Amino acid sequence: MSMADYKREGNIQETPFGYTLSVIGGKWKMLILYLLAEKQPVRFNDMKRQIGAITFKTLSSQLKELEADGMVNRKEYPQVPPKVEYSLTEKAESLLPIMEQLCDWGVKNKNN
């Protein structure tokens, strides 16, 4: 089915494209997934440091959403101070070829 076929069926948010955007859309989720694709597992503070402009609250909520959507694994170690690591799930790893295509598009079009 094409995107046009899905659009004709009703609300675009109910399409596969709408679902995809609900999982990875927004300012930070793709950056978080990209960071985890480059190196995993990553601890929360390391992720915050590498992303930079994101607040602790926003990073925490974005990670919780990605975890709820089955994109990120969260592993908590029972120690003091607390240690939490994040990694990609198999579901998220299936998105990596598409993310590489987006990077290729960016390389080709960034300076145009």
Image: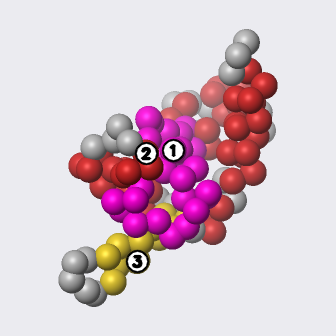
Circle 2: residue type: Ile
Task: Report the span colored magenta.
Answer: 18-47
Frontmost residue, 92 versus 37: 37
Q: Is residue 111 visible?
A: yes
Judging by the rendered image, the residue that carries numbered circle 3 is: 75
Circle nearer the viewer, 1 or 2: 2
Residue 36 position within the rendered picture, expressed as x and y whole percent measured from the top left: 54, 59
Q: Which mark is residue 51?
A: 2
Circle 1: residue type: Leu
As helix, strand or loop, the secondary structure at mark 3 comes to strand
Q: Residue at x 42, y 63 (%)?
A: 67
Q: Is residue 24 magenta?
A: yes
As helix, strand or loop, the secondary structure at mark 2 comes to helix
As helix, strand or loop, the secondary structure at mark 1 comes to helix
Q: Is residue 19 magenta?
A: yes
**N-term-proximal mark, 1 vs 2:** 1
Circle 3: residue type: Lys
Residue 28 position within the rendered picture, expressed as x and y whole percent measured from the top left: 44, 41
**N-term-proximal mark, 2 vs 3:** 2
Frontmost residue, 41 versus 70: 41
Judging by the rendered image, the residue that carries numbered circle 1 is: 31
Q: Residue at x 58, y 62 (%)?
A: 39
Q: CA distance from mark 2 to mark 3?
A: 20 Å
Asked whether the beta carbons under mark 1 and mark 2 sit within 8 Å of each other, the answer is yes
Q: Residue at x 54, y 53 (%)?
A: 35
